Image (spheres, helix red, strand yellow):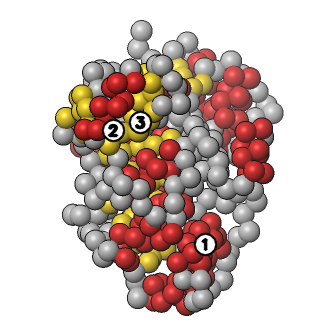
Amino acid sequence: MKKIYILDTNVLIHDPLSFTKFDDNTVIIPISVIEELDTFKSAGDERGKSARIVSRKLDALRAYGKLNEGVKMENGGILKVELDHPQVLPAEFVLQQMDNRILNTAFSFVNKKNNAILVTKDTNLRLKAEAVGLIAQDYESGKVKIDELYPGLVAIEKDAAFIDKFYKDKAVKSGEEGLVANEFVVFRAKEDPKKSALGRVDPADTSVVKALSPESAPWGVKPLNKEQRCAMELLLDEKVALVTMIGTAGTGKTLMSLACGLQKAVEENVYRKLIICRPIVPVGKDIGFIPGTKEEKLSTWMGAIYDNLEFIMDRRHQDDALQKFEYLLQNEKIEIASVTHIRGRSLPKQYMIVDDAQNLTPHEIKTILSRAGEGTKVVVTGDPYQIDNPYLDIASNGLTYIVDRLKGQKVYGHLTFTKTERSQLAALVAELL
């Protein structure tokens, strides 16, 4: 039976092409959603960009018919822009509220015995829909199964003789199926669990596991566990163009990324500069307008980045750490920006770190990654359990999306951190709270 899907504004902002992803069913965009998109179109952020994309796509469909009567799309579905209906909701739902107007439009289709479903990323709107007997769903396209998310590190039991051979030859045929390019493997001896070896799957031949490069300490930062050791292997490898790292607070994601970025961009000059960016999403109540230059505004949001950079500088330049930091900023060897300022740029031969990527939508992360020019390396980090964007969750954010989609690519590597190294208190908080 054909279905009618009524889309909320946040679905179109999350994915501007979402209306094309409901197969051969009918998709309704309420006029109230069009009005709300109109208020966003002039914004300079990703929300404004998404609103403009939706408007252009809908305008293009007008060439194939009237939107108020329904236009057939390439996937066989029908798209229709629906005007507001007379109130069919109970009297306590005031139609001056935009959500209630969308809900009223959806409920009017139910009253006409249609198989109607409201699609929204707003949890409260789904609850209100449930209260009036309307089926409501989250937008599921692009969601990943978090329990099956690629960890980047696997443990395999082998005979002690196999491990001895691995240490001797520095490479070995794993004899295992399902390993992917740049995946890390911990070989453990069946006879003695304490006897182990750490290797990395060869991207040129996934049947081969190679020993890691000799351990290094970029800018005085040494790996404290096997996960950090593996991460450093990826971060310093120029052939791996994209690295993702997932982990709770204090696992060393940002610190490791910055140290390796400084090593490659400042020390070895492999890349022209180190660019660090993160989304600007307030935690708790927003403090509103912040005066000052772009750099002064960003310093409020980039505290974690500055803290880690100063920590690294102190280890390398104990006497003049602050002066060295300012020198690198002024000479543009280090650039700190919000993701909004990255859009529209072309970034060749750069070492780019995208921090807190769990607050980005799949569409936003795609936009950022497409900025990478020839010779650019991109490192994406975050914690999907610390999402501040109200319309994202652990399964629908940009970070887990790219981990799920890029697994197995030769130029891609990933690692999930499980051990907190910041402090005993931080580890306790991460485990118990």
Q: Secondary structure at mark 2?
A: helix
What's the distance in space between the residues labelled 3 and 1, CA to CA? 31 Å
Q: Which mark sits nearer the N-terminus, 1 or 2?
A: 2
Amino acid at circle 2: Tyr
Placement of 203 over or under 239, stated as above or below: above
Q: Position of residue 111 (x, y in %)?
A: 61, 17
Amino acid at circle 3: Ala
Q: Position of residue 139 (x, y in %)?
A: 51, 32
Q: Position of residue 14 (x, y in %)?
A: 48, 45
Q: Secondary structure at mark 3?
A: strand
Q: Which mark sits nearer the N-terminus, 3 or 1?
A: 3
Query: Which residue does the image show at 76% across and 27% down from the upper left?
Result: 90
Residue 167 shows which numbered tag?
2
Query: Which residue does the image show at 25% across and 54% down from the upper left?
Result: 239
Residue ID for mark 3: 197
- Kindly give the residue lying farthest to the left in the view shown: 204
